[in-house]
Amino acid sequence: MAVECATMSRGKMLRITKLNECGAVVTGPGSTVVADAFVSGTFTPNYAEAQEISILNANGAECISDRSAVALRWVDISLNVCTWDPTMINLITGDPLVLDDAAPTPNTVGWRLDADLTGSANFALEFWSGIRGQSCDTEGNVKYGYWLFPWVKDAQWGEWSIQNDGITATWTARAVFGGDWGVGPYDVRRDATVPATLEPLLTPIGATQPMHYEVTSAPLPTPACGAVTLPAP
């Protein structure tokens, strides 16, 4: 059985998908956004503090020694983007959009930080990273590292500065267990048939799995300003 090892560098693309409060995909207008305008995504597994038991006998030697099992709680995420897309902000934080008075269809021109709504959004987060030192296959396909966090919540705004420099937006959030991503609403891999066809994940995301990674030769999604419609399956 072959193994896909990869030397990776650079982030290529991200995609955000709207979820409901149960972690299920929400289809319809404004449910998904794709962007290449991000600076970084940082991911830190968060573990419960281990409980240790150590009891010495009367002679000072350790009599009982035990330590609780490793317990992953969630994955802490820090996201930094360099384009201020109000619809992306709404999908990440839940903060409401600001519209203008254009008729018949208003334009989205901003957002408002709202204490009742900020941090209320649920979303899925996908990243693609580059793979170094590879050659295209016989069909001209390039491979990427594909990273999926199928249920992210509790986003909090970080600091931003308006100054003589670039202005970026930062958030922290948590990738958690559960949800209802299944195999996802997107074709993110090529199957093993010849010629290959584009397919969603091979197996559904499990109840204890806050992250998925694989090497894929599926094409990158196309970036655009503004969230777009995610069709119903």
Image (cartoon, grey):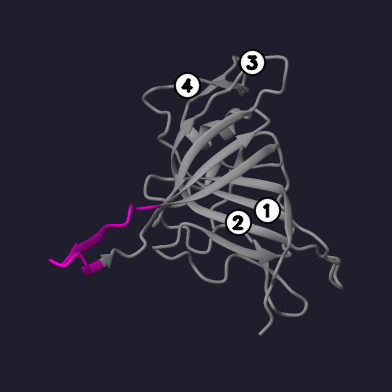
Disc 4 or disc 1, which is closer to the eye? 1
Q: Residues within 10 Å of mark 2 (few under 14, many from 20)?
A: some
Residue 192, image x and y in percent?
Answer: 69, 78
| Residue 213 drawn at (x, y percent) | 59, 62
Q: Which mark is residue 128?
A: 1
Question: In the rendered image, which residue does mark 4 sit on?
Answer: 113
Disc number lying in front (1 or 3): 3
Placement of 95 over or under 153, stated as above or below: above
Q: Identify the mark nearer the N-term, 1 or 3.
A: 1
Q: What amino acid is labelled 2 in the image?
A: Trp
Q: Secondary structure at mark 1?
A: strand
Kindly identify which numbered label has been placed on residue 162: 3
Q: Quadrant of residue 145?
A: bottom right
Mark closest to the chain's N terminus, 4 or 1: 4
- Amino acid marked by disc 4: Leu
Q: Which residues are magenta?
A: 47-65
Q: Secondary structure at mark 4?
A: loop
Label 4 vs label 2: CA separation?
29 Å
Residue at horizontal 78 percent and vertical 77 percent from the top: 195
Q: Nearer the viewer, mark 4 or mark 2?
A: 2
Mark sitting earlier along the chain (2/3): 2
Q: Could you tell me which residue is drawn at 61 percent across and 37 percent down?
A: 227
Residue carrying label 2: 147
